[in-house]
Image: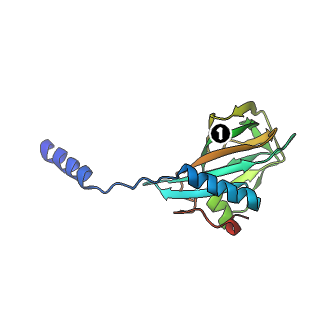
Amino acid sequence: MVNLLAFLVLIAQVSSVSIPAVTVTNSELQETLDIAVAQGITDSPMRTIDAGGYHVGVAIVGRGPSANVVAGTIHSEVTEVYSIVEGSATLVTGGRLIAPRARENTALRRMLSGPGSTGTGMEGGMVRKVNKGDIIIIPAGTPHYFSDIPESITYTIVRIDPGRGLTLLDSTPPPEMLK
């Protein structure tokens, strides 16, 4: 009986259909970033797939110089993984938001980063300098913001959404959808 059960499990695994892999090429990243910069768009989602029980999205972000920013945001359901492509910045993570308020759950919000909150600042966060090549994992529910960007910063974001609230995308949406 145990052998029959093991055989059935093996057959189920062999005959199951895998989820196709998705590639976002460097040229697609650069083209999307160029369009975003020209259109004044900060966060450009490129793909979001159903990864079998959760959604995974990829975006490219370009931020210009800013200094002495006091803010904060939380993505309540989505973990973000930043990979710094160019530039550097000061990133604040953790602690708690000051005067949090829920962000409107619009179609654009569901395409970008899902539900969450913003605040007028943060207290108790960890301040760190991030540079080209660094990877930062920001778990869902963790407040974060860039307090200082000396010149500019470009980074990719992988968004992991176990609640499957992010909108599925098989290509980069047109710029007018991201404003």
- Residue 104: x percent and y percent? 73, 62
Q: Tell me if 176 is positioned left or right of 65 in this view.
A: left
Q: Position of residue 82 (x, y in %)?
A: 63, 42
In terms of depth relative to the viewer, which is nearer, 27 or 116?
27
Tell which of 161 and 33 is nearer to you. 33
Residue beneath the point at 71% across and 49% down: 62
Identify whether 175 is placed above or below 84.
Answer: below
User: Residue at coordinates 84% horizontally, 44% vertically from top-left?
Assistant: 66
The count of marks equals: 1
At label 1, the amino acid type is: Ile
Please identify the quarter of the rendering in which residue 148 is found. Answer: top right
- Would you call the spot at circle 1 few (<14 residues within 10 Å), some (14-19), or many (20 or more)? many
Instruction: Work out whether residue 113 can be spotted.
Output: no
Secondary structure of the residue carrying numbered label 1: strand
x%, y% of residue 146? 77, 41
Quadrant location of the N terminus in the rendered image: top left
The location of residue 165, given as percent across then percent down, is 57, 59
150 to 52, vertically: above or below: above
Q: Is residue 43 visible?
A: yes
* Residue at screen point 62% across, 61% down: 111
Residue 137: which quarter of the image? top right
- Residue drawn 69% across and 64% down? 178
Q: What residue would you read off at disc 1?
A: 84
- Quadrant of the image for the C terminus? bottom right
Residue closer to the observer: 175 or 119:
175
Question: Colour mode?
Answer: rainbow
